[in-house]
Image (tube, coloured by chain):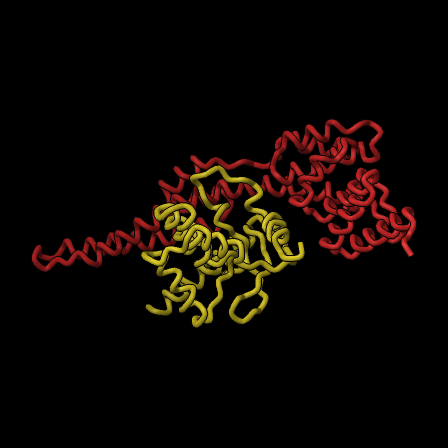
Amino acid sequence: MMSVKLSVILILLFVMRVLVSSEFDFGWEEPVLFNNGYYEQRISETGENSSGVQGMIAHYRSHESPWRGTHCPCFPTCSAYMQYSLSEYGFLKGMLMGVDRLYLRENRTLLEGANFYFKIERRNYIDQEQRSGMYDPPEANNIFGENDWRTVLPYFYFIRERDKMPGN
Amino acid sequence: MVPKSDEKLSAGFDALYSAMLYNRRMESETLFEDIIGSFPEKKNEVTGYYLYYLMKLSYFEKSEELLKDAENNDKTYFYRSYKYLHDNSLKESSDNLSSISADFKYKNESDTLFQMINQEPGYDKKYKSLAFMMSAILPGSGQYYAGSRFDGINALSFNLITGIATYSSWQYELTKDKKDRNYILPGIASLSFLGFYFSNLYNSVNITSKTNLYKEGLYYQKILDRFNMIISDQEYFLSYRIDF
């Protein structure tokens, strides 16, 4: 019975892999390294809430994530994404956006299924290793507001960050 | 010995060009301000060169004030159009392109860019409401319609698993006697099913709007690249001459 379940799961994974590989490939890679800087700054500007869900996420980010050894494949990382959306869009919208990200997008890269998104290079803040990830900012995922085509292009994030760097 | 005025000017230009050549932006800015301060009559000329540098490397924020004050010529219109497109102000961008005179060196290219900005980006637009309704009837179908097959199957499988768990747990509890019933497991299963169902609805609308944004964004990114290509094409840094 166990082997039947296992084979069903394996077949499902295989089918999903094939379907994902036939998706629209944006195929654009940005050689610049991305980090959570902008979102960290915005979170601190809006006032970090140390109670409730935001407090739990803050605790996870400062105390647990560094010891876990796993790495979020997205940019910004899922915890930064959720903290930012909670502080920026409020509890209900923020939770919806966070759940949407965690359950329906984070696992994409397990199947190398990031075709549907722009691939970027980002540096992990624990071991400083460079990995490829997918570009998925919170601004592009807010369905309640009017979104701009510029939010989905990594180029605009890069320009904004570069202009703020010291010496620029 | 104090250098003569002409020598000082040419030394200033040399220093500015070399700073621009090696992409030292802070140094270029200081030199630019120095030259303007010492030789106010050369302001238009130096501003033109400095704007060329800022535009070539897409320093849009830095160029904002300079572009406002710059004298109105074909180059300035072209730069302004590039900046406005970057700010998603399509109307201003096309207005500036249309002000370019017929004897501009890149008139053909600027006309093509004008047409590209004014026409609708050609892509098959997906409808949010249709995706929402499809996902409400069968979870995952809206995402599949929008083009994201992975999200579709992901949403369908999460909803199927939690739906079956909810159904079977309620069925199991309701077959028991009333006093033996325990509603904790069916409650948790129902809550998780509802959570996945609503996030599936959110995701269907989100993925549809994002698909449209991606296609639109790729279209405008191409135009921006084309602008940058025309600007960057004509550079003679080594011979200290910028012929644009």
Which quadrant would residue A67 be assigned to in this image? bottom left
Relative image position of residue A139 (x, y in whole percent): 49, 46
Colour of chain B in the image: red
Q: What colour is chain A?
A: yellow
Q: Quadrant where the N terminus of chain A lies?
A: bottom left
Please give the name of the residue rendered at 56% of the width and 41% of the height, measured from the top-left corner: A149
Regarding residue B200, the answer to whether it shows in the image is: no
Which is more toward the observer, B84 or B215? Answer: B84
Percent x, y of residue B35: 80, 46
User: Is residue B240 positioned above or below B76 on the image?
Assistant: below
**Whether residue B59 is visible:** yes
Point out residue A151 in the picture as x, y percentages from the top left corner.
Answer: 55, 45
Given residues B11 and B161, the one toward you in this image is B11
Front in this rendered view, residue A146 or B236: B236
Image quadrant where residue B192 sits: bottom left
Task: List x then y, in percent, for residue B52.
Answer: 77, 44
Q: Say which quadrant the C terminus of chain A sits in.
A: bottom right
User: Is A148 drawn above or below residue B3 in the view shown?
Assistant: above
Judging depth in this view, the residue of A140 and B129 nearest the camera is A140
Classify residue B228 by image quadrant.
top right
